[in-house]
Image: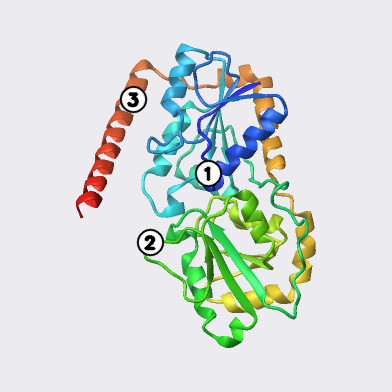
């Protein structure tokens, strides 16, 4: 089959969405499927809409482009929209509404966690053709090969990593852990390392820090540690804790967003108020969780196969899904196009204003 994915792959370390694309494209091509990133061809079997927001820097087309394609080139092409974003994630406004508007072009919707699916259902999603497909990371890169078990006579080395520097990635937790190390008794038993970008003006007192690392370098680095912590708030899914778990690091995680769906049973849930106690609980039960992680199965191949199974199901039942489509009139399409135009103009002027402010400050 020929699949068009509405995002381009970015070079270097660039967050979980980019990693998902790399893994899915590699898996599809391994099965001899064709992957493109545009809507030029008339023989596309399925479109995967991943970045419909107009200000997305890696989007190659949006829902309006999809609707125009269906109307003018091939109305037998099926459309899947993947949801991995929401306003709750970074305290934004309008993203949920824009993603739901984009859903007008989709025959089927996929969510990266049940938590995220529940958000959009409560927000007013009426499309009944939907499911959750949990994400995964590449086990050829992130694995327990040559991973040493923690020597309990040495410090318990805790690590986390993020591409995004947004405060909601868990920096309140990481700051609390960093300050716990002011206590010499605690610092003699544990250490903390942060890999990735930091919020502007923020620095740690006791933690070790490294810049973002690409997959191969990151996988090697993670194996130097004993436990993994994530304090990310309202994360729809995330890749960071999955990469840590696949690398053999028992998890410390908070009950927020979709993260518990990936972490439950493979470590200890904590809150910022009981962080110190839960770290020592994890250390005391290290062997139990380390053994369980040998069966941790959130891998990119498993995720990609679920997408392939869905695509093949949709194509095999193409006529049923096409029959259930809502009819989009030329007038509605025009109104959507005008709205999108003004939104892009607004983004342009905001970026120009920000540039001028920075240039002449």
Q: Nearer the viewer, residue 116 or 12?
A: 12
Q: Point out which mark residue 200 bears.
A: 2
Q: Point out which mark residue 84 bears.
A: 1
Residue lying at 36% horizontally and 16% vertically, measured from the top left: 330
Q: Does the residue at mark 3 contact the one at mark 1 (Cβ under 8 Å)?
A: no
Q: CA distance from mark 3 to mark 1?
A: 24 Å
Give the image's coloring scheme.
rainbow
Q: How many marks?
A: 3
The answer to whether residue 214 is seen in the rendering is yes
Relative to 21, does residue 239 appear above or below in the rendering?
below
- Mark 3 Cα shell of 10 Å, populated few (<14), some (14-19), many (≥20): some
Q: Secondary structure at mark 1?
A: loop
Q: Quadrant of the N terminus?
A: top right
Q: Secondary structure at mark 2?
A: loop
Label whose residue precedes the other's in the sequence (1 or 2)? 1
Q: Nearer the viewer, residue 298 or 354?
A: 354
Which residue lies under the disc numbered 3?
337
Residue 146 placed where, x, y %?
A: 78, 59
Q: Quadrant of the C terminus?
A: bottom left
Q: CA distance from mark 1 to mark 2?
A: 25 Å
Q: CA distance from mark 2 to mark 3?
A: 36 Å
Task: State which mark lies toward you, 2 or 3.
Answer: 2
Residue 22 placed where, x, y %?
A: 60, 38
Residue lying at 44% horizontally and 36% vertically, measured from the top left: 100
């Amino acid at each position: 089959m020929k699949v068009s994915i509405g995002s381009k792959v970015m070079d270097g370390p660039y967050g979980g969405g980019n990693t998902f694309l790399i893994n899915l494209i590699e898996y599809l091509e391994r099965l001899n499927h064709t992957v493109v990133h545009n809507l030029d061809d008339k023989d596309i079997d399925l479109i995967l809409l991943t970045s419909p927001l107009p200000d997305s820097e890696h989007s190659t087309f949006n829902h309006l482009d999809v609707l125009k394609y269906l109307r003018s080139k091939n109305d037998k092409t099926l459309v899947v929209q993947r949801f991995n974003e929401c306003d709750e994630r970074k305290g934004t406004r309008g993203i949920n509404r824009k993603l739901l508007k984009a859903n007008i072009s989709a025959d089927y919707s996929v969510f990266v966690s049940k938590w995220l699916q529940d958000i959009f259902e409560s927000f007013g999603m009426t499309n009944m053709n939907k499911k959750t497909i949990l994400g995964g990371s590449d086990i050829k890169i992130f694995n327990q090969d040559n991973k040493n078990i923690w020597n309990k006579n040495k410090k318990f080395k805790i690590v986390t990593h993020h591409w995004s520097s947004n405060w909601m990635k868990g920096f309140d937790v990481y700051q609390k852990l960093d300050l716990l190390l002011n206590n010499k008794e605690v610092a003699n038993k544990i250490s903390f390392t942060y890999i990735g970008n930091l919020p502007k003006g923020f620095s740690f007192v006791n933690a070790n820090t490294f810049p973002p690392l690409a997959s191969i370098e990151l996988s090697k680095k993670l194996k130097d540690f004993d436990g993994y912590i994530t304090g990310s708030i309202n994360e729809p899914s995330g890749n960071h804790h999955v990469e840590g778990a696949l690398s053999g690091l028992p998890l410390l995680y908070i009950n927020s967003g979709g993260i518990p769906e990936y972490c439950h049973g493979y470590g200890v849930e904590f809150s910022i108020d009981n962080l110190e106690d839960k770290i020592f609980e994890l250390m005391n039960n290290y062997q139990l969780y380390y053994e369980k992680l040998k069966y941790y199965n959130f891998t990119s191949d498993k995720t990609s196969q679920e997408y392939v199974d869905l695509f093949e199901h949709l194509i095999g039942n193409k006529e049923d899904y096409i029959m259930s489509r809502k009819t989009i009139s030329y007038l509605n399409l025009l109104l959507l196009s005008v709205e999108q135009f003004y939104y892009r103009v607004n983004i342009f002027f905001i970026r120009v204003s920000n540039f001028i402010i920075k240039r002449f400050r």
